[in-house]
Image: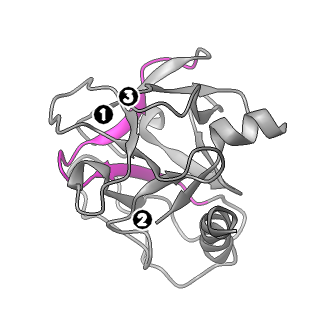
């Protein structure tokens, strides 16, 4: 039940934004001021199904091209804390687009390629780069450029996170669904 609620939190928060919540206009470019909607700052991105207590982590790295990994959630670890920075205007016809910025490194998640199983890494934030732009649909996190979702092939600590096509099966849900905590 606890995990199902987390997934609903992500879906509900994204739904509230799609409904046209009153948030400031977007910030574009590399030096833009962060626009973090209420409830989207300093959050952990935690697996919803499968092994409990597994979070996305940057493993203390501040380097560009460092791999995103799955780690046991640690309440105070800034390497597992993220700001979901809203970058597009408040247009009802448009899905909300975010960059996902790590609290420790101050870098953003991106993919170098749209190919299936491309590893997700961090790099200096550039909100204009579609490789760094993400949308939320239900409990999945989808890259705008690749049109694929964040995926953990297993729940073992240290598992590198990749992008793969959405898989709505039970097996796919275990690998691809995330919640805010």
Q: What stretch is highlighted in magenta?
A: 96-114
Q: Which of marks 3 and 1 is nearer the N terminus?
A: 1
Task: Kindly state the secondary structure of the residue where label 2 is placed.
Answer: loop
Task: Kindly state the secondary structure of the residue where label 3 is placed.
Answer: loop
- Report the number of discs: 3
Instruction: Indicate which disc residue 26 carries.
Output: 2
- State the quadrant of the N terminus: bottom right
Q: How crowded is mark 3: few (under 14 residues within 10 Å), some or many (20 or more)?
A: some
**Distance from the alpha carbon under mark 1 to that under mark 2:** 22 Å
Check the image and name the residue furthest to the bottom: 22
> In this picture, is 75 found above or below 165?
below
Does the magenta segment cover residue 103? Answer: yes
- Quarter of the image for residue 151 reads top right
Residue ID for mark 1: 122
Residue visible at 64% across and 78% down? 20
Residue ID for mark 3: 158
């Amino acid at each position: 039940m606890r995990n199902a609620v987390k997934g609903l939190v992500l879906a509900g928060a994204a739904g509230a934004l799609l409904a046209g919540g009153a948030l400031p206009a977007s910030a574009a470019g590399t030096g833009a001021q962060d626009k973090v909607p209420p409830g989207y700052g300093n959050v952990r991105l935690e697996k919803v199904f499968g092994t409990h207590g597994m979070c996305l982590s940057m493993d203390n790295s501040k380097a560009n091209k460092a791999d995103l990994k799955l780690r046991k959630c640690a309440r105070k670890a800034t390497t597992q804390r993220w700001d979901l920075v809203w970058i597009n205007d408040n247009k009802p016809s448009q899905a909300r687009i975010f960059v996902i910025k790590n609290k420790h490194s101050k870098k953003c998640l991106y993919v170098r390629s749209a190919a299936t199983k491309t590893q997700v890494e961090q790099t200096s934030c550039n909100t204009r780069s579609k490789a760094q732009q993400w949308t939320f649909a239900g409990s999945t996190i989808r890259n705008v450029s690749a049109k694929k979702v964040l995926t953990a092939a297993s729940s073992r600590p240290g598992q590198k996170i990749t992008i793969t096509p959405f898989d709505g099966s039970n097996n796919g849900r275990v690998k691809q669904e995330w919640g805010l905590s």
